[in-house]
Image (cartoon, helix red, strand yellow):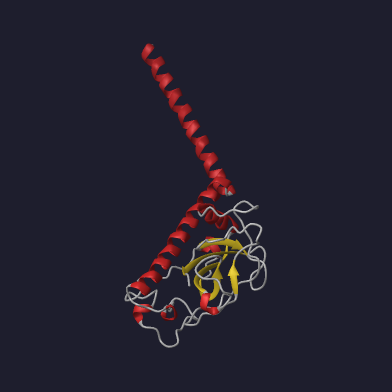
Amino acid sequence: MKLISSEKGNVLIIIFIAIALFAALSYTVANMMRGGSDIGREKSSIYAAEILTYAQSLKEAVQMLRISNACEDEDISFESNLLSGYEHSPIASNNCKIFHPDGGGVSYIKPNEDANDGLDWIFTGDNDGYNIGTSCNAASCADLIAIMPEISLEICKAINKKLNISSANNYMTQEDDAFSVVKFQDTYSYSERLSDSAIFMALDGKYSGCLEGKDTPQSAGEYYFYQILLAR
């Protein structure tokens, strides 16, 4: 009788554990189906880390081209069979190409669909970082910059949080004007300084960051990540 009673008790414990596990699993699945906020934040943080890591690899490749391969600022090329509009003139040497084994050795990685609908990176030499390198409102001071366009707001905030960029709007800041997205071929020009309002100056001295657009060709409600690859 004692043995039977003990077995019944063990069965009841197993049933209770099974019920508890099923309830926990149901709660987790329900959160995933609803796109629970905790899961969303975690995914945004992962994407943000991936973007920052890749951007840093591009920056290091540019530095290597200049130091090890003796490439001049104008010689750096973003030509790739996966991109269009970066045809260099004059034709760039392979050892000055970011995406060539003889050059930077970096593989071009298209952004994840969840991050910005898979829009390509933009590489431009038409803007200037705020208090980065020399500032003179002229082509001679323009920086070489990688821009990831139309990034999601959640990932944009996650990037700025990792970079300690904050303003009055919870790790979000807005460009004070418009900036150029002209593709770099061999010529630098000056269009705009990547900065927010003088009130916040959240991007002051920041080599990378994420910001909200303001004026054409960007607009409010669109978010852009930038990485200065070469400060001039």
Residue 2 falls in image quadrant? top left
Q: Is residue 180 above or below residue 111?
A: below
Left or right, 29 with reference to 93: right
Residue at x 36%, y 70% (from the top left corner): 64
Q: Farthest bottom residue?
A: 90
For this view, does 146 lie left or right of residue 202?
Answer: left
74 versus 55 height, above or below: below
- Position of the N terminus, as image quadrant, is top left
Image x and y of residue 157, in percent: 57, 55
User: Is residue 104 in sight in this rendering?
Assistant: no
Rendering coords of residue 7 (x, y %): 39, 19
Q: Is residue 27 visible?
A: yes
Q: Position of residue 104 (x, y in %)?
A: 36, 72
Give 6 or 146, whichever is nearer the viewer.
146
Front-lying residue, 119 or 50: 50
Q: Is residue 194 left or right of residue 52?
A: right
What residue is rendered at 43% in x and 19% in y?
A: 9
**Res. 67 image quadrant:** bottom left
Q: Position of residue 206 (x, y in %)?
A: 52, 61
Picture residue at 56% right of the left edge, 44% below the top: 31
Left or right of 73? Residue 40 is right
- The front one of 129 and 1 is 129
